[in-house]
Image (cartoon, helix red, strand yellow):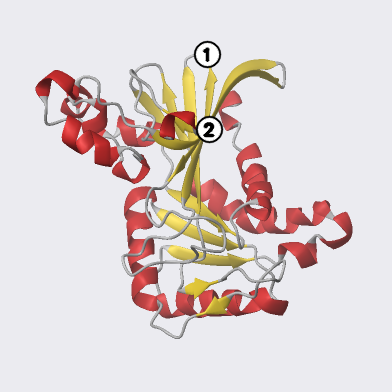
Amino acid sequence: MMLTTEYFYYSATYDLTHTLQRLFNTSPEFHSISLHERADQRFVWNSHVLRELSQQPELAKFCLPIMLGFISISTVMVNSHTIDYILVSRRCIFRAGTRFNVRGVDLQGQVANFVETEQIVQYGEKLSSFVQTRGSIPIFWSQKANLKRLPNPVVMEIDHLSAFQKHLDHQIFTYGDQVIVNLVNQHGPEHVLEKKLAQVVTNAQNSRVRYEPFDFHKECSRMRWDRLSILIDRLEPDRKRFGYFVQHGAGQVIMTQAGVFRTNCIDCLDRTNVVQSLIARERFGILKS
């Protein structure tokens, strides 16, 4: 089944599950470990198979981690510069499920549809990486399918704070400071999600987390896509503060990324794609540095 399903990837020579910055921040011993042992287990979709096979020495060399997501490699021209542009999206194995059936966070702080997206640009001897994340709104909520085209989301009557804090603690440990960009409607059925998330963020009182709500549909109604500049301008101080990873040659690091934008809408698809694309477009500074 896995081999006939689209968007599963593996490599026999490169660790697809880690960002460039994570790979750089490892020891020489780490790189001597087999790919399946050193892989980020959040993104290994065949770990249950590898666990048994890797115990057999004669089969261990065939154990390669398989990642679910998307990879694109292109050679493009930007401002008269020829660059290699690589996009890698890694979908998390935890709280996996289909639209409507799996939403929100669980007790361990794992959220539905969590994806880490890394934009890699190679220009000459310089290599840059910019990472963003997306994931379902990290509170307890559901949206069970019914005869309506868009069922109303329901916020559960439960303590949201503990699971939210677990989720953000892991995100901060892995990526640094967080800006939660919430694109859901601030009116109508989606409003209950925005209201509850804002309340939970306030109650968490985490100085490394900033909340940025933006009613995408209201602000951009009637095809007024230019109004997305309102959001991008509000994110600009964080974008400058976070930076991005830049490596020159084999080992000289010029800059590292200190935080990420964690973007969500309801499905973490269309609205999220638009905003993440705009944020990523600003990250071609490698051509100037």
Secondary structure, mark 1, is loop
Question: Is residue 220 shown above or below 129?
Answer: below
> From where the camera sits, is residue 57 visible?
yes
Q: Nearer the viewer, residue 37 or 124?
A: 37
Residue 208 x/y as whole percent: 41, 63
Residue 244 x/y as whole percent: 48, 38
Residue beneath disc 2: 6
- In the image, taking residue 167 as reference, residue 289 lies left or right, namely right
Q: Residues within 10 Å of mark 1 (few under 14, many from 20)?
A: few
- In the image, taking residue 227 as reference, residue 16 lies left or right, namely left
CA distance for labels 1 and 2: 32 Å
Secondary structure, mark 2, is loop
- In the image, taking residue 103 as reference, residue 218 lies left or right, namely right
The answer to whether the residue labelled 1 contacts the one labelled 2, judged by CB atoms less than 8 Å apart, is no
Q: Amino acid at mark 2?
A: Glu
Question: Is residue 267 shown above or below 118?
Answer: below
**Where on the picture, by quarter, is residue 283?**
top right
Q: Nearer the viewer, residue 185 or 120?
A: 185
Q: Nearer the viewer, residue 4 or 44?
A: 4
Q: Residues within 10 Å of mark 2 (few under 14, many from 20)?
A: few
For the point 46% across and 32% down, the residue is 8
Residue 90 x/y as whole percent: 45, 40
Question: Is residue 273 shown above or below 66?
Answer: below
Q: Amino acid at mark 1?
A: Gly
For the point 64% across and 75% down, the residue is 152
For the point 72% across and 16% down, the residue is 80
Residue 243 x/y as whole percent: 49, 42
Mark found first going from the N terminus, 1 or 2? 2
Residue beneath disc 1: 124
Numbered mark located on residue 8 in the image: none
Quarter of the picture containing the N terminus is top left
